[in-house]
């Protein structure tokens, strides 16, 4: 099990647990505001944008090329940006904090 | 106050949750004839078809989310009539439900053409719902070897790619002279034809299917294709009947204004079933897409809650076939010039840029999110693109090179 904490734009903190699936799915299951996942998780819509806490970024890893491209013109993008649907959940992610970008 | 929403797919469900977000305090009742917990439709022709997943893996929202948001789900209940005078709807089972605001998110259904033998054939399927896919998955258990897909549109091509992945021999029969004739350019049609051929799918265009028999599909030109699994994907019919019967204005879809309101101020409509005037393209359009449903749902919810909102999204779509990820933005209809780019040395990575004079209308991008994202921005802001630089693939796709 990995415990993941989301912090929404309004400051609400939601901690959820999962052992599989991806971050977008976990956020949707737990009604995390600002994560829409409109495309169903195929990296086509960029509505599951999160900023990984800098101290946890190594655990999550950097964005793939397509993620970077999808976020290129996004005003909220920064060096810790990832798309939740592209982050697979595993034990290694236990304890990470994600700031919802929108 | 009660808001009744008819149709619980991407549009209806998003509308319900957005209503709460916008401050609607009354009841929200969501109806759908489909008895499954509302699900994502795009995976139906892709991962849901090729896996053993339960449809719940693709739920739009968890079941508890509806409870938490105070959204009543009436699944498996078909709405039969709308009485706009009395402001009630009545279900097929005869239950009547009053409303203050009504939202029609009735979507569309597959069109099944009147082909001889089709109605009698046991191995013919359509794909629009989870149930439809479960039917195909059931048929796949009998290990069919030869699949024929009637219709070379996105749905047909996605199914072809999925069935190839499962190891079937697949033939796509398209009535027109090229694939995707109504939705993309000849250049992209050629690309898709080559993509499918390279992956072992047989593409046959200008094929008018005339008859279906137990084990074959027959065309008007005398050709015959052996088939133990047949899937029809020749387009949709918009579900406007409820609206028409209720005296709402419909043409090629339920006519809505910029607030997604019908000619009855208490009745809204959104998604595939609507015809709206595109501000950006200045013409009426009807779109079949998740984006349109989801974005209109936001406008509907805000409008119902008395907030100012206006639907002015640039349409976008996506499709995944084999190793090609297609992302499209804008509407290319009426283009006078197309500029094609193949990014050098990066495998399959291309884009098609459609112009009408100097105006960029649309971009189709294959494995090229950068082109898609840049195209979106240029179209939205009506930024004039340097075509010469765009056509020069020695210059990387960067805003600085293109404007």
Image (tube, coloured by chain):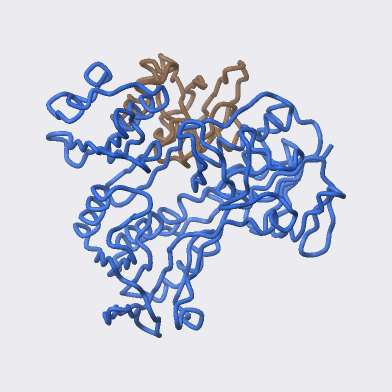
Chain colours: A brown, B blue
- What residue do we see at 64% from left, 48% from top? B105
In the image, residue B195 sits, relative to residue B103, either above or below, namely below
Total number of numbered labels?
Answer: 0
Residue B359 occupies quadrant: top left
Residue B39 horizontal/vertical position (percent): 56, 49
Q: Residue at x 77, y 58 (%)?
A: B81
**Residue B289 or B25: which is nearer the viewer?**
B289
* In front of the other: A66 or A61: A66
Pick out the residue farthest to the right: B86
Q: Horizontal and vertical percent for residue B255?
A: 62, 45
Residue A59 appears in the picture as rendered: no
User: Taking B175 as reference, is B118 above or below it?
Assistant: below
Q: Is residue B35 visible?
A: yes
Residue B66 is left or right of residue A75, and the answer is right
Q: Residue at 34% across / 63% down in the picture? A: B163
B157 or B142: which is nearer to us? B157
Percent across and percent down for residue B178 are 28, 59
* Side of B252 where B115 appears, left or right: left
- Looking at the image, residue B4 sits to the left or right of residue B364; the answer is right
Q: Residue at x 80, y 57 (%)?
A: B90
Q: Position of residue B65 (x, y in %)?
A: 67, 39
């Amino acid at each position: 099990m990995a415990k993941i904490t989301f912090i929404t734009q309004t400051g609400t903190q939601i901690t959820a647990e999962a052992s599989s699936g991806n971050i977008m799915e976990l956020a949707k299951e737990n009604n995390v505001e600002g994560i829409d996942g409109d495309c169903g998780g195929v990296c086509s819509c960029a509505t599951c944008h999160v900023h990984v806490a800098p101290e946890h970024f190594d655990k999550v890893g950097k964005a793939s090329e397509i993620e970077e491209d999808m976020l290129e013109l996004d005003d909220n993008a920064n060096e810790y940006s990832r798309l939740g649907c592209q982050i697979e959940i595993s034990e290694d992610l236990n304890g990470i904090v994600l700031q919802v970008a929108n | 106050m009660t808001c009744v929403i008819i149709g619980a797919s991407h549009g209806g469900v998003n509308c319900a949750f957005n209503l709460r977000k916008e401050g609607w305090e009354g009841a929200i009742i969501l109806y759908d004839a489909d008895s499954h917990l509302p699900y994502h439709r795009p995976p139906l022709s892709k991962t849901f078809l090729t896996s053993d997943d339960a449809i719940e893996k693709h739920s739009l929202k968890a079941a508890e989310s509806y409870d938490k948001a105070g959204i009543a789900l009436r699944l498996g209940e078909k709405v039969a009539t709308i009485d706009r005078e009395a402001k009630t709807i009545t279900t097929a089972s005869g239950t009547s439900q009053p409303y203050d605001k009504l939202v029609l998110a009735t979507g569309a259904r597959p069109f099944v053409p009147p082909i001889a033998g089709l109605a009698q054939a046991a191995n013919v399927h359509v794909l629009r719902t989870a149930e439809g896919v479960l039917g195909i998955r059931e048929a796949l258990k009998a290990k069919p070897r030869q699949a024929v897909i009637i219709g070379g549109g996105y749905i047909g091509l996605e199914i072809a790619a999925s069935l190839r992945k499962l190891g079937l021999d697949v033939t796509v029969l398209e009535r027109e002279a090229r694939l995707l004739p109504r939705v993309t350019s000849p250049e992209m049609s050629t690309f898709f034809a080559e993509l499918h051929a390279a992956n072992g799918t047989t593409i046959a265009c200008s094929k008018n299917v005339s008859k279906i028999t137990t084990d074959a599909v027959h065309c008007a030109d005398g050709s015959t294709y052996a088939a133990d699994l047949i899937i029809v994907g020749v387009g949709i019919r918009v579900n406007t009947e409820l609206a028409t019967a209720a005296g709402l204005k419909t043409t090629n879809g339920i006519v809505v204004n910029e607030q997604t309101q019908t000619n009855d101020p208490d009745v809204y409509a959104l998604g595939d079933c609507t015809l709206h005037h595109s501000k950006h393209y200045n013409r009426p359009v009807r779109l079949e897409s998740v984006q349109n449903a989801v974005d209109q749902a936001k406008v509907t919810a805000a409008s119902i809650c008395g907030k100012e909102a206006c639907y002015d999204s640039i349409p976008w779509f996506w499709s995944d076939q084999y190793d090609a990820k297609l992302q499209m933005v804008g509407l290319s209809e009426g283009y006078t010039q197309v500029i094609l780019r193949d990014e050098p040395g990066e495998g399959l990575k291309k884009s098609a840029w459609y112009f009408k004079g100097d105006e960029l209308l649309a971009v189709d991008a294959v494995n090229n999110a950068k082109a898609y994202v840049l195209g979106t921005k240029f179209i939205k802001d009506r930024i004039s693109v340097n075509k010469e630089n765009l056509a020069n693939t020695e210059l990387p796709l960067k805003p600085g090179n293109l404007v």
